[in-house]
Image (tube, rainbow, N blue to C red):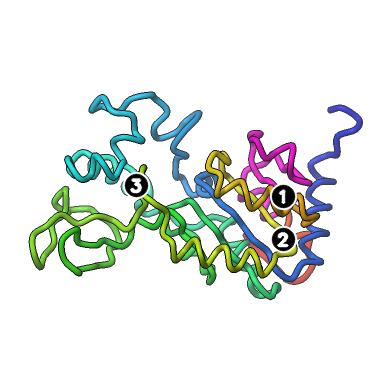
Amino acid sequence: MPANLPSIEATLDAVAGHLGQARRALFITGAGISADSGLPTYRGVGGLYASEATADGLRIEDALSGEVFALRPDITWKYLIQIEESCRGAQPNAAHRAIAWLESYLDRVMVFTQNVDGLHRAAGSGEIVEIHGNLQELACTACSHQEAVADMSGREIPPRCPVCGAVLRPKVVLFGEALPEDELDRFIEAFQEGFDIVFSIGTSSVFPYITQPVVLAAASGIPTVEINPLRTQLSDIVDFHVPLGAAEAMTAIVRRLGVGEFSG
């Protein structure tokens, strides 16, 4: 290791020091935070969709698009079910629990997540913006029927509305669809009110709405932290890059705070 690079332990100490002085923390999370819960990331090594094309000859972005869903909901649901099956039975890991645990010690903890697995809610986090929606709520495409589902095992695919018989869809944002305005507005309002520290955890940092809050925070002098075993476009922008898995890193950080016992 070059002499001018801090050790991981020193980086963790520094991050914990800033977090200990903060009253309001923002956690921006992607698929990597759920890796220790046994969920695959959707791209890259070991990803659920590491190949260029699906079995139907479509790119996964096309198979999971609003355009294909409108024409062939059976194809889109085929891949939604693969994602849902990969989430089925998964439990929050130490990273999810650490973020929820911090709510007892900070004035505000907001989670802005790309994930549709519902694990932040299961861990007990209270203020969550699920910018891509979640797989646990279904809505009819023709009438006002909605329902919550624990999982999709045993369901007809594509599932049908028990009221009118139309196709149901999960409340997720498919490729090519707009982000939910109410959730985006809620996040923008919270960001404008201000945070004392901003974390990016387990995201490849591809989408502008994921990277921009970190870039803006860094430019404003707010401490910024990236937790990711791999480097991304944010790695050279943030104050601290922690090259560890989310569960290991968050456990190490909160245990350094000295404000309570976190069991992991």
| Vertical placement of residue 185 versus 84, above or below | below
Mark 3 — residue? 174
In this orientation, which residue lies closer to the viewer: 172 or 177?
177
Residue 251: image location, x then y, percent? 67, 55
| Vertical placement of residue 57 versus 140, above or below | above
Considering the image in quadrants, where does the N terminus appear?
top right
Considering the image in quadrants, where does the C terminus appear?
bottom right
Q: Distance between the Cα atoms at labels 3 and 1?
A: 29 Å
| Vertical placement of residue 214 versus 162, above or below | above
In this orientation, which residue lies closer to the viewer: 189 or 5?
189
Rate crowding at label 1 as few (under 14), some (14 to 19) or many (20 or more) other CA atoms within 10 Å.
many
Q: In the image, which disc is placed on residue 254?
A: 2
Q: Distance between the Cα atoms at labels 1 and 2?
A: 14 Å
Name the kind of residue labelled 1 in the image: Val
Q: In the image, which disc is placed on residue 225?
A: 1
Q: Secondary structure at mark 2?
A: helix
Q: Secondary structure at mark 3?
A: loop
Marks 1 and 2, the one that precedes in the sequence: 1
The residue mark sitting in front, 2 or 3, is: 3
Marks 3 and 1, the one that precedes in the sequence: 3
Name the kind of residue labelled 3 in the image: Leu
Q: Secondary structure at mark 1?
A: strand
**209 horizontally vs 161: left or right:** right
Residue at x 70%, y 72% (from the top left corner):
106
Residue at x 76%, y 61% (from the top left corner):
19
The residue mark sitting in front, 1 or 2, is: 1
Determine whether label 2 and label 3 are within 8 Å by CB.
Answer: no
Residue at x 47%, y 65% (from the top left corner):
121
Q: Residue furthest right?
A: 3
**137 horizontally vs 35: left or right:** left
Rate crowding at label 2 as few (under 14), some (14 to 19) or many (20 or more) other CA atoms within 10 Å.
many
Magenta range is 225-252
